[in-house]
Image (cartoon, grey):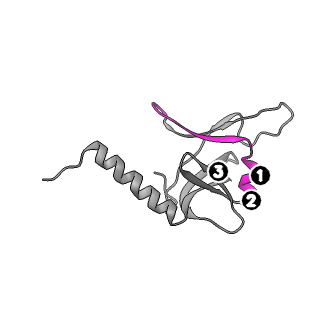
């Protein structure tokens, strides 16, 4: 049976992502709340909408609707490895008088295009 090296697999993934981005696809980050009212976000692969704010960083595109863009101003999306790994939002600026949407640091739930957790 044929196999693929780790290097080949990585290059194929990067090639696929470049083609997706060249076709206009990017990652949509949506601010929402869960059943308890706590702030959460979801990430999915999507096309740009007319009123989206587009963030291009490190070779990726992130699309934000106007409401999410306003609520996520001054946040940075990051990824943590290890136990409890996953996406996280870091507030890049913090003033005591600011209302906190997520607090200084909160986890971001990641959902697939079909809405189920990955």
Q: Say what secondary structure mark 1 lies in.
A: helix
| Labels 2 and 3: the sequence-earlier one | 3
- Counting other residues with Cα less than 10 Å from the Cα at mark 2, is it few (<14), some (14-19), or many (20 or more)? few
In front: 112, or 21?
A: 21
- Tell which residue pokes out farthest to the left in this image: 1
- Counting other residues with Cα less than 10 Å from the Cα at mark 3, is it few (<14), some (14-19), or many (20 or more)? few
Q: Which residue is mark 2?
A: 66
Marks 2 and 3, Cα distance to the nearest angstrom? 20 Å
Count of marks, rendered view:
3
Residue 113, visible in the rendered structure: no
- Tell which residue pokes out farthest to the right in this image: 97
Q: Which residue is mark 3?
A: 34
Q: Would you say residue 87 sits in the magenta stretch?
A: no
Magenta-tinted stretch: 67-84
Q: Say what secondary structure mark 3 lies in.
A: loop
Return the x and y of residue 73 as percentages of the image width and height: 74, 46
Q: Would you say residue 72 sits in the magenta stretch?
A: yes
Residue 59 horizontal side relative to residue 49, left or right: left
Name the residue at 29% across, 43% down: 6
Residue 20, visible in the rendered structure: yes
In front: 109, or 28?
A: 28
Q: Which residue is mark 1?
A: 70
């Amino acid at each position: 049976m044929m196999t693929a090296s780790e290097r080949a697999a990585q290059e194929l993934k990067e090639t696929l992502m470049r083609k997706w981005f060249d076709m206009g696809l990017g990652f949509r980050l949506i601010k929402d709340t869960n059943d308890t009212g706590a702030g959460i976000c979801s990430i999915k692969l999507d096309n740009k909408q007319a009123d989206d704010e587009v963030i291009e960083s490190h070779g990726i595109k992130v699309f934000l609707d106007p409401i999410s863009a306003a609520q996520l101003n001054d946040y940075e999306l990051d990824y943590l490895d290890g136990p409890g790994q996953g996406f996280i939002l870091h507030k890049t600026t913090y003033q005591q008088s600011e209302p906190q949407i997520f607090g200084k640091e909160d986890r971001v739930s990641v959902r697939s295009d079909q809405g189920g957790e990955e």
